Amino acid sequence: MVALSNSDMIAVLWEMIFRESDTVVILIEWILARMVLHPDVQSKVQEEVDMITERSQPVMESDVTNMVYLQTVVNEVLKLHCPSPLLV
């Protein structure tokens, strides 16, 4: 086994830190792409959001914990399209 030098370890850590913001953007893009391909899933997510937020209210962070279907969709997209090989 080859040991990484300090500069190599620092480079890997910086890559992880800077790539983290990209992973969120990539995940959102994949979620939206998958919902475009599956309008039935998009409709169910929209129904859940409307039901929990009373349709005209903005989504609050506290609302997300009640959105079981949305969380399931996000988890399934993560299984299909992991945004970072380091997350696997």
Image (cartoon, grey):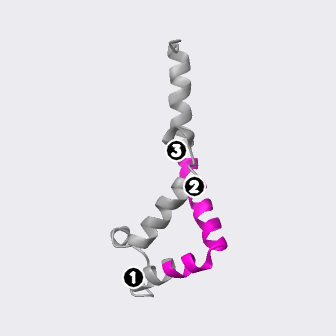
Quadrant in the picture for residue 32 = bottom right
Q: Amino acid at mark 2?
A: Leu
In this rendering, the answer to whether 36 lies above or below 52 is above
- Frontmost of labels 2 and 1 is 2
Does the magenta-highlighted stretch encompass residue 37? yes
Asked which secondary structure carries label 3, the reply is: helix
In this rendering, the answer to whether 10 lies above or below 54 is above
In terms of sequence position, does the residue under pointer 2 or pointer 1 come before the other?
1
Which residue lies at the image location 42% right of the left edge and 83% below the top edge? Answer: 57
Does the magenta-highlighted stretch encompass residue 2? no
User: Predominant secondary structure in magenta?
Assistant: helix
In this rendering, the answer to whether 68 lies above or below 54 is above
Residue where numbered disc 3 is placed? 20
Q: Residues within 10 Å of mark 3 (few under 14, many from 20)?
A: few
Q: Residues within 10 Å of mark 2 (few under 14, many from 20)?
A: few
Quadrant in the picture for residue 84 = top right
In this rendering, the answer to whether 60 lies above or below 31 is below
Q: Is residue 69 left or right of residue 16?
A: left
Which mark, by number, is residue 5?
Answer: none
Q: Dots 1 and 3: beta carbons under 8 Å?
A: no
Residue where numbered disc 2 is placed? 80
Which residue lies at the image location 62% right of the left edge and 74% below the top edge? Answer: 38
Q: Amino acid at mark 3?
A: Glu
C-alpha span from label 1 to label 3: 29 Å
Which contiguous range is marked in magenta?
20-44
Q: Dots 2 and 1: beta carbons under 8 Å?
A: no
Which mark, by number, is residue 53?
Answer: 1
Residue 73 in the image, given as x and y percentages of width and height: 49, 66
Q: Amino acid at mark 1?
A: Thr
Q: Residues within 10 Å of mark 1 (few under 14, many from 20)?
A: some
Asked which secondary structure carries label 1, the reply is: helix
C-alpha span from label 2 to label 3: 18 Å
